[in-house]
Amino acid sequence: MPAIETKLLRESDRIEEELRRLILTLELEPGLAVSESTLMKQYGWGRTPLREAFQRLAEQSLLQIIPRQGAVVTPLNLFDFVEVMDAMSMVIGKAAELACVRLTEEHLARLDELVTQEAIAAGEGDYIRVADLDYEFHQILANATGNRYLRDYLIHLHQVATRFNFAVWKRDHNVTPSLREHEQLAMLFRQRNDQEVEKAMLAHIENARKRLVGNLK
């Protein structure tokens, strides 16, 4: 690959990561029309890598590309959230069971660290940080399944769900139930208790559904 193409690819990766963070933490609000020229001026990004990042984020359901109009941050819709959680509940239990036997000691140590860091961030009212840590927690588990198709599917669902989680946490200032569930999951993973892990993960997803649906109605 020519050097210039490699440089553009790296730049589009960096832009995609930053835009994803802005969208997941609602700094770019749902339904917002995203201006290429504004982003290019504000961040110094190039048009070509920015458009490549837009296309990838559209594939992740975080942006909607409207022909001849531009890009719009995908709106938050309660029905979308219900469908995401339904899809997740169909695979998350077995995925967690699979990850349970494949997590390395390094993974387990990181899960413990994330639980601690989530509690600190929540205590400081830093819900952007909580959302980032929550996403990393589930990303580690998705990667640990060892199945790239399952991994990509789960990560996609968690990317969509993260915005809903953040919206509720930011409004209610209460992430304690979710943090306690993460703490329980980290303990069960360390015990290699795959059957209890499956049950606890399914309960975590169902509890998240109930909390979010109740708050977003």
Image (tube, helix red, strand yellow):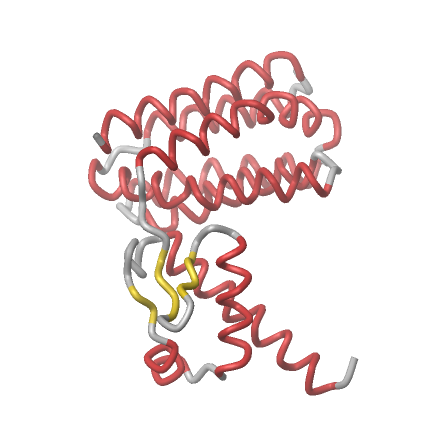
Left or right: where 33 falls relative to 99: left
- Seen at 28% across and 43% down, the residue is 167
- Total tally of numbered discs in the picture: 0
What is the quadrant of the N terminus in the image? bottom right
Picture quadrant where residue 59 is located: bottom right
What is the quadrant of the C terminus in the image? top left
Left or right: where 12 falls relative to 75: right
Left or right: where 194 falls relative to 129: right
- Seen at 52% across and 23% down, the residue is 89
In the figure, 108 relative to 210: above or below? below
Left or right: where 16 falls relative to 146: left
- Seen at 67% across and 22% down, the residue is 97
Tell me where residue 193 appears, x and y as whole percent. 66, 15
Picture quadrant where residue 41 is located: bottom left
In the figure, 167 relative to 197: above or below? below
In the figure, 184 relative to 25: above or below? above
In the figure, 128 relative to 151: above or below? below
Tell me where residue 67 appears, x and y as whole percent. 42, 68
Q: Residue furthest front?
A: 68
Tell me where residue 80 appears, x and y as whole percent. 38, 37
- Seen at 53% across and 64% down, the residue is 55
Tell me where residue 111 appears, x and y as whole percent. 57, 37
